[in-house]
Image: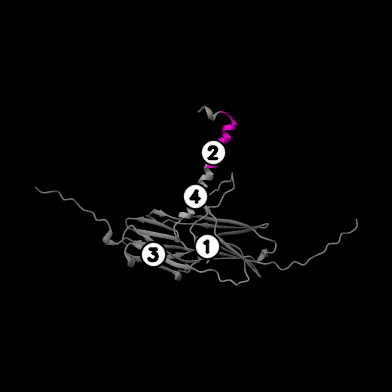
Amino acid sequence: MLWRNVGDGSRSLWREMDRIRREMDRLVQSSDRFSAPAFPALNVWSNVEGVVVTAEIPGISPDDLDISIMGDTLTLSGSRHPEEISDDVRFHRRERGYGRFTRSLQLPYRVETDQVAATFDKGILRIELPRAEADKPRKVTVKAGGQ
Amino acid sequence: MSEEHKLEVHKEEAETPEGIERTRPGRTYVPRVDIFEDENGFVVLADMPGVAEDSVDITLEKNVLTIHGGVDFQPPQGYDLAHAEYGIGDYHRAFTISNEVDRDSIEATLSDGVLRLVLPRAPEAGTIKIQVQAG
């Protein structure tokens, strides 16, 4: 294209455009703060045999975590306690949150509730939910039709 | 409980200085921290879920304290990621610290994905007056 060969002037314009685009991307990204899901954020892994749900919940004891399943809904709740500190402490930064949380997630299918296993390691919760046997896809064989 | 101390899910990605690329692929996040000070010194608490004790690197160079936590996440085998609300990556953050810190007795512990750094205050340095001698 002709106008791309005009020299340095246009190149810096391209760079400027690029900068604006990146700036816009950044704005769009930071706005996901408002549409962000409730705590804790969940990642869901699935296949036909079951679902694995992981969540980052640092600084919580497994005893303070409650996992329940009702039908095909998984509910996580718990609370993160603030650090016990005396009053004469001066805070420089306070970015970590505390308090109670509840989060429900609809699973893609019903699960075998008595085979659900949860582990909590290094602040990451991992729940394995095998698919209910009755809910698994069944293969239907087509018989050749007799006359 | 005030607004700013609510539990949040937003993970901020660490910025790399312009022109510098990371050698390892993947994302790097800024851990959320609490920093407070009492009569004994400073305490830094950093949320770093997924970081193992042997993959934390804490360095103090001049007066810059750098925290790096490597995350080695193995996705569940045979599963596909169906829905993702958080990204997975290493943690990195640096702070400048003052001379009041006793550099030799900084302690770090990690439990349930939270790093706790204790930076004790240095014993008061005595004031030394230096006499200027006539040349």
Q: Residue at x 30, y 62 (%)?
A: A132
Q: Main secondary structure of the magenta part?
A: helix
Residue extending furthest toward the top: A2
Q: Secondary structure at mark 2?
A: helix
Q: Amino acid at mark 3?
A: Thr
Q: Amino acid at mark 1?
A: Glu
| Label 2 and label 4 in one chain | yes
Q: What is the spatial separation of the Cα atoms under label 2 and label 4, in whole angstroms?
A: 18 Å
Residues at badges 2 and 4 in contact (C-beta under 8 Å)? no
Seen in the picture, residue A1 relative to A86 is either above or below; the reply is above
Q: Splitting the image into 4 quarters, where does residue B83 fall?
A: bottom left
Seen in the picture, residue B29 relative to A57 is either above or below; the reply is above
Residues at badges 4 and 1 in contact (C-beta under 8 Å)? no
Q: Is residue A8 left or right of residue A59?
A: right
Residues at badges 2 and 3 in contact (C-beta under 8 Å)? no
Q: Is residue A10 left or right of residue B103?
A: left
Q: Residues within 10 Å of mark 2 (few under 14, many from 20)?
A: few
Q: Amino acid at mark 4?
A: Gln
Q: Residue at x 56, y 38 (%)?
A: A16
Magenta includes B98? Answer: no
Q: What label sits on residue A17 in the rendered view?
A: 2
Q: Earlier in the sequence, mark 2 or mark 4?
A: 2
**Residue B123 % position (x, y):** 71, 68
Q: What is the spatial separation of the Cα atoms under label 4 and label 3, in whole angstroms?
A: 28 Å
Residue extending furthest toward the front: B2
Mark 4 — residue?
A29
Q: Residue at x 56, y 55 (%)?
A: B92
- Which of the chains bears the disc numbered 2? A
Mark 1 — residue?
B3
| Near-viewer residue (A91 or B133) | A91
Mark 2 or mark 3: which is in front?
2
